[in-house]
Structures are given as C-alpha cells and as structure tokens.
Amino acid sequence: MEAAIEHFAVFGGVKIYAPTSEPLIDLITTKILDKYKYLRNDISEMTMGDNQNHAVLTALANGDRRTNSAFRKTDIAFNKGINIVDKLCDRGMLSLETSRQGLTSKPQNNDISEKLLFTTPFARFWFSLVSPLFKGIKEGNYEEFLKEYTNKQTQFAPLVFEQLSHEMVKLSFKDDPIAQIGRYWDDNISLDIIAKTKSGKTIVGSCKYTNSKVKKTELTRLKNICEELGIQADTYVLFSKKGFTSELKSLKGDSLKLFTPRNFTQLIS
C-alpha cells in the first residue's frame, strides 16, 4: 500500500498504466518525461496556455497551498490572482478549501487565507517539477529534473496520504455518518483532520507519513490543541505510515482509532 500511495501521488487522476511493481522513477521517465510533448498539449488545453495560470499553479504546487502565498510568489495582484483561481476551479484543475473554523469554539477570523487543492495528484506533480523544468525535458535532457526530483520526491505522498485519510474516516464511521470533514488552520495552529458526525460527535486527527512510529506524544499534542481551540473531541484518529508504539496501541478503543496504509485496502475494495 505504501508503493500504491506513492505511485498514486504522481499518476493519480490520469489514465496512465503505472504498476507498483516497477520503480517509480523509471515510470516517471518513460510515462511522463519521454511523453512530455503529448502530455503538455493536454495540460495546455486545461490551462488555456496562459503563462500567469502556469505561474500560479507552480506556486501552489511548491508552496503551502494558501492563495495569498501563491500570489506573492508570482507577483500577481490579489484580485487578478483570485480571477485566475476562479477560472482554474471552473475548469476543474483546482478546488477551494477553507479552514473549518466553525467546528471549533474559537472566534472566527476572516483574515485566515484560503487554501487550494489540485483535483488530481498528477497535476500537482506536473506543476511542481515538470512545467518549471520544461526546457531540458523537451530537449530530452533530464539531468536537472532528476536532481530536483531527488530533492522533492518525499513531498508528494504526505498530502495524498492525508486526503486518503479523510476518505478513510468517512468509511470508518458508517454507523454515525460524517456530516462535515476538513482541516483547520490559523496563523499558529493546524489540524490535519477535524470532522463532525451526523449525531454531533467531534473527531480530531493527525496524519504522519514518516519513517518512524507515532508515539503517545502525538495524542497529547492533539489534546492540547483541542483545549486551546475549545474543541470537545469524542474520538481521536491517528494515521501513520509506519505504525504506532506499543504504548499508544494499548490506548486504542472507542475514543482512539489507529490506522496504517494497510487499512486503505478498504478504499480500493
């Protein structure tokens, strides 16, 4: 499942056969770089071939997903940037995400910047690495791309893991269906998962796509954040790439649910 997540973080959303039995970098080379000219035409059709659209998408792919940050990086005025984002959302490339402030007791702050999500992992990968380095790729010189990919390869799977975790939460609370789910952020605090069930119960969680087991300190950190935000959490959900310590697993129950990539097979079925 780890391989499936990492392959999906690159090829998700496009009809390209990318078997997990093959090394990801080999597939990127043969299925994306070698086919650059054909794929570029499809991407350009979606972005209308506009340089400012490409600039905003690249800033989003390599940044913190906040609209304000992307506009500053591209030196595009806010109103112009919002028009670009609206068009890209209308064309199905991006979706707008707002902080779930309404699920906390903290007064809402209208100054909190919205964030944007690429609707396909492939588009995010393309604008992070392929589009900015198109000159060498177009000429068949992949040296710069491979260097950049080595530096950035670990940044693609965590967000996909987080998005899949949201789907896993929806699947795991069928008896009391999820009514709202998203993320919370402000200038100082962030939560990977905050959700409300149909009966009104609150779920809070975190996602760790790292090569170490999650410890009890992560649960303590979540509880401290909930206290600061005035959240009465009924259930905590923790997602971990490499599992959990024995101490944390001993606390598993109705108020604490633990998930690893193995659980994601349910999403496939």
Image: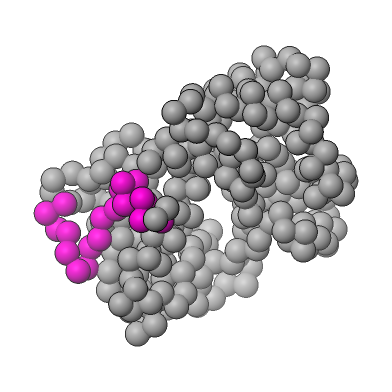
Compared to residue 70, the image places residue 195 above or below, namely below
How many numbered circles are shown?
Answer: 0
- The residue positioned 67% from the left and 30% from the top of the image is 32
Q: Is residue 265 magenta?
A: yes
Give x and y (percent) for residue 135. Answer: 81, 23
Estimate the x, y position of residue 54 in percent, counting from the top left. 79, 43
Q: Would you identify the image quadrant in which residue 189 lies? A: bottom left
Magenta range is 249-267
Is 33 drawn above or below residue 83 in the view shown? above
Closer-to-camera residue (208/221): 208
Q: How is the image coloured?
A: one colour
* Nearer to me, 14 or 64: 14
In which image quadrant can residue 194 be found?
bottom left
Residue at the image point whose x is 29% and y is 36% from the top: 212
Q: Quadrant of the C terminus?
A: bottom left
Point out residue 254 in the picture as x, y percentages from the top left corner.
19, 69
Where residue 252 sits, quadrant-wise, is bottom left
Q: Quarter of the image containing the N terminus?
A: top left
In the displayed orientation, state which residue is furthest to the bottom.
199
**Which residue: 64% across, 43% down?**
15
253 drawn magenta: yes
- Can you see residue 230? no
Q: Residue at x 73, y 28 (%)?
A: 35
4 on left or right of 225 = right
Q: Is residue 139 above or below residue 168?
A: above
Q: Which residue occupies the foreground of this view, 90 or 112?
A: 90
Residue 29 picture location, percent across and down: 63, 23
Kindly tell me whether residue 15 is visible in this rendering: yes
In the displayed structure image, the side of residue 152 where residue 129 appears, left or right: right
